[in-house]
Amino acid sequence: MSYSDEEAAGSDVEEEETEEEKTLKEMVNACKYGNLAKVKELVGKEEEEFVEKRDEEGHTFVHWAALGGYNEVVNFLLEKGAPLNEHSDNDYGPRPIHWACVHGNITTVDLFVERGVPIDTTDLNGCSPLLIAAQYGQSLAISYLLQKGASKFHVDINGDSALHWASFKGQPEVVFILLNAGLNPRQKGFLRSTSIKGDIQCAEMLMEHGGSVEDKDSNSKTPRMLALGRRHKSLVKFMDTRDLSNIWDWKTVVFGPPGRSRAGVIFFLAAIICWAYPMYFIKAVPLTMETEVNAHIAFWVASVFMWVMFVWSKFSDPGYVKTNREAYEEALKLIGNPSAWGEYDNMNNPIYNLCHTCKAVRPVRAKHCRQCNRCVEVLDHHCPWIDNCIGRKNRVAFTVFLYVLGVNSMFCFYFSWRIVELEGADFAMYIGLSLFAVFSISGLIMIGFQLYTIIFNLTTNERANYRRYRHFRTSNGRYKNPFDRGFMKNCLEYWNVIEQVGVLRRRGNHIV
Ligand SMILES: [Zn+2]
Ligand SMILES: [Zn+2]
């Protein structure tokens, strides 16, 4: 047989395989993206056993529908006789309920539990749904499973529990829920797990609940030694400063505690107060004041305006969410009862707007800031240059601050340039020119991003994390920004001229 014959024979076999694979792939995709009509069409066309088939990696169709949280597809497949709770045919052997936990699809997990799947059913590594939810930081699924009676002490084949996994993966919200559920961090090296990942917030919670930095593992290594070995300098520093004898360490007082550094704002202030203004008074004023008086007046007006806006955006309340424990407790109960969610949609369901740290049901678009340790309404981002959050209440001041900062940086660049022209360049002037060029360019980039935020009504946080929010998805899984009201209304809303839409409001004891 010649090479070309072999090739032709090979392609025949390939075509045969491709035909079968094609249907299988179409079915997997239909399940993956929740296309019920396509699923019905393919199941109708094929033989009865078709629903029991698996993809190339050994997963059933129910696995794929569970991963996407498409309950209608799951229900249809189960009615047609698809397996409810089988392992995938691979090394880990997850069951569909485990895949539903990966994305925290509580209603899908509830569907399996209601159909009789044991709440602590394990994959081939001994992981229960609770452990999988802990690995992926699915705090709502954790609350649901605990309410339904999942064992918080369950361990996998390596002896790791949900708290080990949450500590190891750096999932502070899950650590918080598990500690509140009564797990004792003094046992079994939870702090050592978090030292490997280096998450300060997890370590802080574990230490607050009694986790010890001196707790040694089988190799005589303490959590501090593990953190040091993995170069988590901030965590090591945090573990040290928790020692009362180090609490007045001058670096902590000036630059802030580890993980909540004030280095950005100190650098910004030092560059202006210690370098820009002295250079301006010593060099720019004597050389150019007489010839360019208008530029100096404009610079001073912009300077005063900049400091007013800086103080306003740095020291004002960015929109902190108040604690509302009653509503929080009410929403917690709702997690274990998905059948009562009918009256809410993805945007206003309080269970999607819980903050366990603040013990609050926060408005839609609010987010917890790790540095400030508070929830902030319409959080844009935490700005290191002003060391404050940018939220609904101070975003206007911050935007104006950005504009005048950009103008001032350009003025400074201009004055530095004039000094070089009149006096020639020295080392200090080169530093000045570079510094102001960097300030001007980064100012322009930030202004560009801020304009995007205004025009499309999408915060910096939402732009980066829209996949995490259910309300940015349509029923068929496509991206849609529910806050976009068109150019004009978006602008008016940003400047607080008109009210934003989609804010959770409370009426009596109920959230509407
Ligand atoms: Zn919060
Ligand atoms: Zn903040």
Image (tube, rainbow, N blue to C red):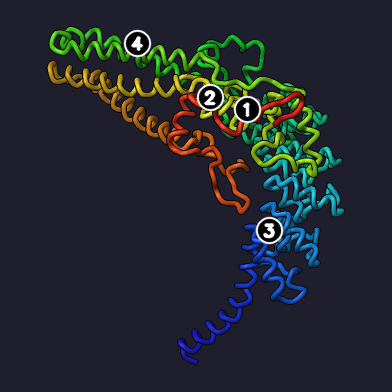
Q: Is residue 278 visible?
A: yes
Q: Residue at x 46, y 25 (%)?
A: 495
Pick whichever of labels 2 and 3 is earlier in the sequence: 3
Provide the secondary structure element on which disc 2 rests. Answer: loop
Q: Is residue 223 visible?
A: no
Q: Residue 270 in the image: x percent, y percent?
A: 38, 14
Q: Residue at x 68, y 53 (%)?
A: 67
Quarter in which the C terminus is drawn: top right
> What's the residue type where badge 2 is placed?
Arg
Pick whichever of labels 2 and 4 is earlier in the sequence: 4
Pick whichever of labels 1 and 3 is earlier in the sequence: 3
Mark 2, residue position: 392
| Residue that extends furthest to the bottom in the rendered view of this protein | 1
Pointer 2 and pointer 1: residues touching (CB < 8 Å)?
no
Mark 1, residue position: 200
Provide the secondary structure element on which disc 4 rests. Answer: helix
C-alpha separation, residue under disc 2 versus residue under disc 3 = 39 Å
Ligand 2 resides in the quarter of the picture at top right
341 and 420: which is toward the camera: 341
Mark 4, residue position: 304
